[in-house]
Amino acid sequence: MIGVARESLVRVGLGAAALALIVSGVAAQPDSPLVTAAPAVREVSLTGFTRPRAELPLAAERAGRVATVAYDIGETIGQDGIFARLDATLLELELAEVAIRREQLQARITHNRREVERYTELARRNNASASRLDTLRQTLRDTRYERRLLENRRQVLQERLQRTRIPAPVGWRITGRDLEPGQWVQAGEPVGAAADFTALIVPFALTPEHYGVLTAAGPDGIRLYLPDLKREVAAAIYRTNPGFDPVTRKIALDLAIRDPVEPRRGGLRARLGLRVPERSGAVLLPAGAVERSYEEFWVTRENGERLRVVLLGNAQGPEGKHLRIAAPGLAPGQRFRLPDGD
């Protein structure tokens, strides 16, 4: 009887050892693949309209009658940079008179200088009085002063002539024209407008949250979609208004389109898409990481803990279908298992 009992104990011991080996073998198997929860985002689309980088009203600096208008609406200012000219006939005649008077003075100065030189030599030989030499020198000085005054008058007339031209920046395009040849305009009266379309600007008003998402994209991560042209273009932050609007509580900024766009004009629609994290705290997980049991959904943490979650919807990620889920204690960055090695 003692021998039979010992044999039974040996068999039980061998069975327990085999079971321990099996259990230890299961525990030694590698863990299931892990996935990391990403923050769920919502797509926000904002629409703006293109406009020129800068606009400039064109005005006459002095009153006068319009002689010529060089450009019409939509045309580009050439290298001369002159939009229109006022009649400058009287100024040109005055300049011609000044030129004649200047020639006369120059001849008198040449003659008086020679007389001074001649009487200086005579006075050195005691053949001329000193008073006569002083008079000639004074006459020469007065003539030179008169020439300087005439030169100043010539510069004033040239400046007035220059201001009969209504300038516009080279390369800008005319967006307004309110004058015709023969029309009388007053000094300071707006007669047109020009705009710089070499760079297209799109203004937006963003909440602080949206502004943070935009700036986090970096200089190469901002894209705009132009529905009118059916194309996507690169953009960059051109300027940000440091002021604050207490009514809208938004940040005003301008985006500059970096890619060439044709036609370059204002009024093109531009859509800005932002991926904003959801305030609900929902996360994205691959569909394979979410288990379904009847009408309930579960996920398995890295440590094996099962967590019941609420399914909020579907999303298409870069690696396929994802699910939007939420639960107390669920946060982005946490790691979960893929059941059955999926």
Image (cartoon, rainbow, N blue to C red):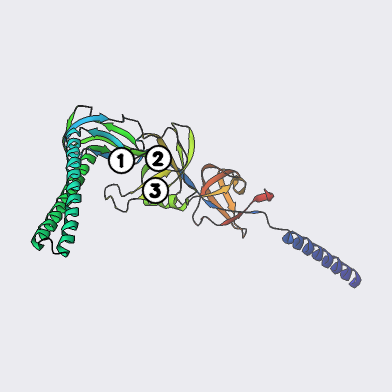
Residue 101 place in picture, x, y as percent? 16, 42
- Residues 191 and 310: in front is 191
Distance of label 1 from label 2 (alpha carbons) = 12 Å
Residue 126 place in picture, x, y as percent? 13, 64
Q: Of the numbered discs in the image, which one, if any, rests on residue 192?
A: none
Distance of label 2 from label 3 (alpha carbons) = 14 Å
Q: Of the numbered discs in the image, which one, if any, rests on residue 238?
A: 3
Q: Residues within 10 Å of mark 3 (few under 14, many from 20)?
A: some
Q: Hey, what amino acid is under mark 3? A: Tyr
Compare marks 1 and 2 and give the one earlier in the sequence.
1
- Residues 50 and 308: in front is 50
Residue located farthest toward the left when viewing the structure as drawn? 131
Residue 81 location, quadrant: top left
Residue sitting at 19 percent across and 27 percent down? 182
Report which residue position mark 2 lands on: 198
Residue located farthest toward the bottom when viewing the structure as drawn? 2
Report which residue position mark 1 lands on: 55
Distance of label 1 from label 3 (alpha carbons) = 16 Å
Residue sitting at 20 percent across and 41 percent down? 99
Report the side of 49 relative to 158 (left or right). right
How many marks the image carries: the answer is: 3
Compare marks 1 and 3 and give the one earlier in the sequence.
1
Report the side of 314 relative to 50 (left or right). right
Q: Hey, what amino acid is under mark 2? A: Thr
